[in-house]
Amino acid sequence: MARKSKYTHEIPKGADAVWRAALYIRLSREDGDKEESDSVSNQRVLLHSYIQEKPEIELVDYYIDDGWSGTSFQRPDFQRMMEDIRRKRVNCVIVKDLSRFGRNYIETGKYLEQIFPFLNVRFISVSDMLDSVERPGQMNTILVPFKNLINDEYCRDISNKVRSSLDMKRKKGEFIGAFACYGYRKDPQRKGKLAVDNQAAEVVRMIYQWFLGGMGMLAIARKLNGLGIPNPSAYKQQQGLAYRHPGGDGKTMLWQDRTVRRILTNQVYCGDLVQGRNRVINYKMQRCRQVPRQEWMVVENTHEAVISREDFQKVQSLLTRDTRVAPSRGTVHLFAGFLKCADCGRALNRRKNVHAYGTYEYYICSTYKKAKDRCTRHTLRVDQLEEAVLHAIQQQVEKAVDVAALLERYRREKGEKAVHFPFEQSMRESRERAQKVRKLKESLYEDWKEGILTREEYLSMKASYQSQLDDLEAAQKLWQEKIEESKKGQLEEHNPILESFCKYRNLTCLTRDVMTELVDSILVHEGGKITIRFRFSENCQALEKKAGELKRELEDGV
């Protein structure tokens, strides 16, 4: 017995002898749709002409999804059409072709083979000449799922090509986002470039300045709200942009501490373009997932910086420290995030002691506070710590000033090339010697051919000359490294390391800015001794060593 087709419909009779049709239209350039031939107006004309020749079909409504991908069936008008089908308002669906209905092979097949037959819905694809009532046999052929598979594959291919094109633009440093980040705007004169939005950029600069000055992120958010400055989402809407933050309701203008953190960690503000932080899972699932930081696409120096790279790095360093702010304070303490126990490596906690003679603050090891058998007190008074750190920084500043003065004097008296002149002379001698050995090696072959040398002598002398050449090439490489090192060791016109210290030559009190710029960490030992680790310590030592060598040269009159 032959199997009954699942496309057998219950034909309307009597008062229901007319099929109530939904004309479904869809267009999306994301799917690679041909805008002219598949346009909404052309589809409308084609479908309307079709039902004019079918007296048994009555038009109920047009259902149009313009700009919606066919890979998903969560489309507004498609869902409205399905609701009308369930309410028995519609019992016939007509489309231009199968690709207009959908480009998801699995979901399209589910609707055509299960949902529509179950709901007794007639399906017509005009260009494909498919009609589940007049030609039900064609719906059972391999042609229908094969066409759906081709439509799905075509969409996947277009998606991969679009993704590759966008990745290429990202690598070239072209901005491809819909909206520029707060502080910038799309440059109307240069496609794919960012231009500074001066009004918003000034707010960004204030945020960095306040944070480097010791304010916490929550305090910064409160201050911005107190000044009546709209948050980034509200600001973009005020500028006439159709922007809506995916995590917000679009109504509030208030700043949040997480918004401040996002600005403080955004590398775009120092002139680099950072893209590819999120990626769509695939062409069928339009949901994004976060991409690991090492896979982000970063192109440096693509646009004007709002924040200097030095200030940005300082902020990133501070964000890694434990700098919690007490609820009653708007700023972090002077040493917050810098103090560590020299033995257990944990942070020190600040405490206050009140007695009959007055009040003083001190630091104590956080490990000792929680478990006295795990570490010792490592206690140190705040006023004593400030005095010791200030004195150490002043000494380091004096050294930097002396080194800068000495290197400037050497440049003035000896000239720039004097430092690496001996290395260049040795390099020149090695090259001349290598050239002579190479000529001797080349002459060996002729001596062997003329019988002046035996084969054994030829091979032995050839190996000896090659060994000399290898040694000379290694020596040249060494001299070149020495030249490069000597050039790096010289004082540049604007040495950022020395400038960082020298600008505090008249320092009389500690500030958060000084700590952030000069100090990496402070180790507190038991008994009150401290070890200060300065930033650029290795570079400073190298400069001091170079200054010592040059000083001896100046004194010896070399």
Image: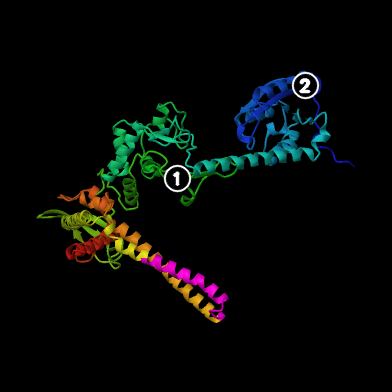
Residue 433 coordinates in the image, percent (x, y): 40, 69
Residue 531 coordinates in the image, percent (x, y): 23, 62
In this rendered view, identify the residue nearer to me: 174 or 208.
174
Distance of mark 1 from mark 2, alpha carbons? 66 Å
Residue 421 coordinates in the image, percent (x, y): 30, 61
Residue 142 coordinates in the image, percent (x, y): 79, 41
Bounds of the magenta segment? 429-455
> Is disc 1 placed on a helix, strand or loop?
strand
Residue 487 occupies which quadrant of the picture?
Answer: bottom left
Residue matched to label 1: 299
Instruction: Please give the count of numbered marks on the rendered protein.
Output: 2
Q: Amino acid at mark 1?
A: Val
Residue matched to label 2: 16
Q: Main secondary structure of the magenta part?
A: helix
The C terminus - image quarter: bottom left
Query: Going from the N terminus, do you reach mark 1 or mark 2 first?
Result: 2
> Is disc 2 placed on a helix, strand or loop?
helix
Whether residue 373 is situated above or below residue 97 in the rendered picture = below
